[in-house]
Image (cartoon, rainbow, N blue to C red):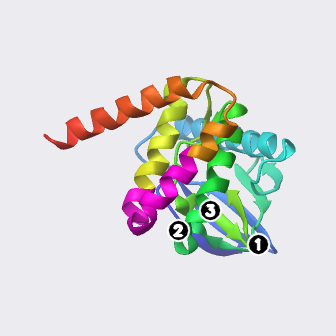
């Protein structure tokens, strides 16, 4: 089993074409509380991936949740992080994919091009460790803000062309009225600018 990523929340391994995600123990938490929390979050993440996969959304195929080791097992997508291969055209597909998530009541919580894998021309969303269920306009707007911010910071030369394609595709596929989501998006951006000015 080969370690391929180490983060503050989880360690990711590869084994025989599968990805294994194991949440990191937190020494500052009481051991029993920490174990219960990691188990609860891992189960919830696995259920989310399974739910989305069964609905035809482009996520890794879930294999199993290993109860004893509290690990999520899923297929490995043989591609590259979109952060390294992003193009303006990808923005359309991402807008549709995020609308599909939101139409199914799932907020990703960490939308960046580092959490999208590109295989050929197809994109797959990964890492649902911060995801949760919600149908609130403000929560959907927070996902859009995260992705908009990621475009600005990571792909600034492409931002002016990519963001309008992204938001247009999202708007055309989201089943809720976009006006409410857009109002919250503008509010989040205003609060962010205000906080950065101090």
How dense is the environment of label 2, judged by Cα within 10 Å: few (below 14), some, or many (20 and up)? some
User: Which numbered disc covers residue 90?
Assistant: 3
Q: Quadrant of the N terminus?
A: bottom right
- Residue nearer the viewer, 143 or 75: 143
Give above or below for 73 relative to 45: below
**Placement of 90 over or under 191, stated as above or below:** below
Q: Quadrant of residue 168?
A: top right
| Real-space CA distance between mark 2 and mark 1, rounded to the nearest whole angstrom | 24 Å
- Left/right of residue 65 with respect to residue 89 in the rendered view: right
Measure the alpha-carbon separation of dots 3 and 1.
29 Å
Residue at 70 percent of width and 73 percent of height: 79
Quick check: 118 above or below 174?
below
Front residue of 48/175: it is 175
Q: Which residue is mark 1?
A: 15
For disc 2, the marked residue is 83
Most foreground residue, 163 or 146: 163
Which range is magenta?
151-167
**In terms of sequence position, does the residue under pointer 2 or pointer 1 come before the other?**
1
């Amino acid at each position: 089993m080969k370690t391929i990523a180490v983060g503050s929340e989880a360690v990711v391994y590869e084994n025989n074409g599968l990805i294994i995600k194991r949440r990191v123990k937190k020494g500052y938490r009481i051991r029993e509380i920490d174990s219960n929390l990691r188990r609860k979050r891992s189960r919830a993440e696995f259920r989310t991936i399974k739910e989305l996969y069964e609905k035809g959304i482009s996520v890794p195929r879930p294999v199993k949740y290993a109860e004893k080791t509290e690990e999520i097992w899923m297929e490995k997508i043989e591609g590259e992080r979109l952060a390294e291969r992003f193009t303006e055209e990808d923005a359309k597909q991402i807008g549709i994919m995020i609308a599909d998530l939101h139409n199914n009541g799932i907020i990703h919580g960490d939308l960046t091009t580092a959490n999208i894998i590109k295989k050929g021309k197809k994109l797959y969303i990964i890492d649902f460790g911060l995801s949760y269920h919600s149908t609130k306009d403000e929560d959907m707007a927070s996902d859009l803000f995260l992705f908009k911010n990621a475009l600005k910071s990571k792909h600034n030369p492409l931002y002016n062309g990519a963001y309008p394609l992204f938001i247009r595709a999202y708007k055309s596929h989201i089943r809720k009225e976009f006006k409410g989501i857009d109002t919250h998006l503008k509010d989040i951006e205003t609060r962010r600018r205000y906080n950065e000015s101090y």
